Image (tube, rainbow, N blue to C red):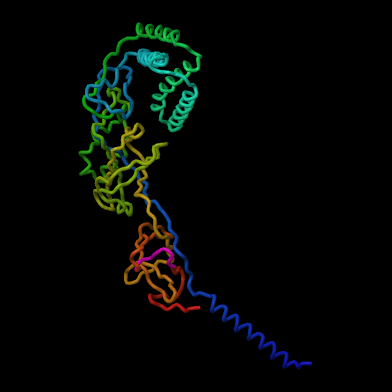
């Protein structure tokens, strides 16, 4: 039987063995640095501001009081001499004229559908599919609140339905329906009073049905001298949409402008000639391509003007609006701010290689409080590259420091 001292010595030797091998395992597996591989990330650089639209506009004056009936829609291009609108004495007369136009169109579609010398209907299926497709398109336009477009598509759907009825044998001709419409047409024509006057386009341009009182004070002529204080003054003014002496206006140029007051860090994001996208938060409108036209002032009080040639019904009457200006998407390497270091005034990160720690520069293209995005360099080894192992935490780090091999 072993003595107590022998058992104690054996226990001590066992403890020392465990400690020795544990220390060796810790040395092998422990790293004094926390590292990570930077991941590619795509970000969109943007800024949200408020601004005001500026256009070349010509107000169409109307000296006769009455009910206006427009013959064109917002954003329709008109030529000099085109009759834009007619003024009627009563709402009943104005409605009757619109109904007359609708009846004439329906008669035209019915006559077209029953003219078998022009249209040879032999199969119902293609027409049925066309009807279903047109209904789907109209539903989409209504859902996107493009009501004027949906209204115009209504006649195309009516034409397809008429042709399908002839093709299926449900109708052989529309003589009775045409006669009924003609009777209604004659009755309306005999009762309606003629227009008091009509509004003629004095020049070529794009129609805007409503005026807002800014037409004479906001024009592209002021852009070169427009300053921060003046712009904010314009933006604080309320529009005047109740001028019955006007019959709309014409936008006489194919380009328009949107001016925004800018201060602080936002000012440095803009450069003249830069391509951007504007989003006004208008349902179904999407992004509007534009170019930075001019930059006035400085970061304390600056004015940035965007220029665009997109002309759309929902856009052409816009005046005051919130806007999100996007500068495009950028892809680069995401780096946590805890990994950012400076060496001789140069921003970069320390990278752990096989044998040493190396300082690599970064080119920041986007940043937040928690991370920065650096462009990817595939040609210059002095810059951070994909799959580099960056050090995000560690002590006594310097360029060229040897890394102990395991």
Residue 387 painted magenta: yes
Q: Is residue 109 positioned above or below 272 on the image?
A: above
Q: Is residue 277 positioned above or below 13 on the image?
A: above
Image location of residue 339, percent across then percent down = 42, 67
Residue nearest the observer in this picture, 17 or 322: 17
Residue at image location 38% in from the left, 60% down from the top: 374
The answer to whether one can see residue 95 in this image is: no
Residue at image location 40% in from the left, 70% down from the top: 350
Residue nearest the observer in this picture, 393 or 48: 393
Image location of residue 294, percent across then percent down = 24, 46
Image location of residue 103, percent across then percent down = 39, 14
Location of the N terminus (image quadrant): bottom right
Which region is colored magenta? 382-388
Q: Is residue 180 positioned above or below 215 on the image?
A: above
Q: How many marks?
A: 0
Decide whether the magenta segment is chiefly helix, strand or loop. loop
Query: Residue 288's quadrant in the figure?
Result: top left
Q: Is residue 57 positioned above or below 127 on the image?
A: below
Query: Residue 159's quadrant in the figure?
Result: top left
The answer to whether one can see residue 376 in this image is: yes
Residue at image location 63% in from the left, 82% down from the top: 18
Residue nearest the observer in this picture, 165 or 394: 165
Image location of residue 158, percent across then percent down = 44, 20
Residue 129 painted magenta: no
Residue at image location 22% in from the left, 42% down from the top: 223
């Amino acid at each position: 039987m072993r003595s107590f001292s022998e058992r104690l010595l054996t226990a001590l030797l066992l403890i020392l063995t465990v400690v020795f091998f544990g220390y060796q395992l810790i040395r092998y597996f422990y790293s004094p640095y926390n590292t990570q591989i930077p991941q590619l990330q795509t970000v969109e650089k943007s800024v949200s501001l408020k601004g005001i639209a500026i256009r070349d506009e010509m107000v169409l004056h109307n000296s006769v009081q009455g009910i206006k009936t427009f013959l064109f829609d917002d954003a329709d291009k008109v030529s000099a001499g085109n009759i834009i609108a007619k003024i009627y004495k009563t709402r009943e007369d104005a409605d009757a004229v619109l109904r007359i136009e609708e009846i004439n169109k329906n008669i035209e579609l019915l006559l077209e559908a029953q003219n078998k010398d022009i249209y040879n209907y032999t199969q119902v299926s293609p027409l049925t599919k066309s009807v279903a497709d047109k209904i789907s398109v109209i539903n989409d336009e209504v859902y996107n609140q493009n009501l004027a477009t949906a209204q115009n598509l209504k006649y195309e759907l009516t034409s397809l339905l008429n042709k399908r009825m002839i093709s299926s044998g449900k109708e052989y001709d529309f003589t009775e329906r045409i006669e009924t419409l003609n009777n209604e047409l004659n009755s309306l024509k005999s009762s309606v009073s003629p227009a008091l006057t009509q509004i003629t386009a004095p020049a070529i341009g794009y129609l805007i049905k409503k005026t807002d009182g800014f037409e004479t004070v906001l024009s592209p002529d002021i852009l070169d001298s427009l300053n921060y204080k003046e712009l904010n003054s314009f933006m604080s003014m309320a529009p005047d949409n109740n001028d019955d002496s006007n019959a709309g206006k014409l936008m006489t140029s194919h380009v328009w402008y949107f001016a925004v007051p800018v201060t602080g860090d936002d000012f440095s994001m803009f450069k003249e000639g830069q391509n951007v996208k504007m989003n006004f938060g208008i349902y179904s409108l999407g992004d509007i391509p534009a170019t930075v036209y001019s930059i006035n002032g400085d970061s304390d009080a600056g004015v940035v003007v965007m220029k665009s040639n997109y002309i759309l019904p929902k856009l052409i009457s816009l005046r005051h609006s919130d806007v999100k200006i996007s500068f495009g998407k950028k892809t680069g390497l995401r780096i946590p701010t805890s990994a950012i270091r400076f060496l001789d005034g140069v921003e970069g990160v320390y990278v752990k290689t096989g044998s040493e720690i190396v300082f690599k520069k970064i080119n920041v293209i986007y940043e937040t409080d928690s991370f920065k995005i650096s462009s990817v360099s595939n040609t210059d080894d002095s810059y951070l590259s994909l799959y580099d192992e960056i050090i995000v935490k560690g002590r006594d780090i310097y360029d060229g420091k040897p890394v102990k091999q395991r």
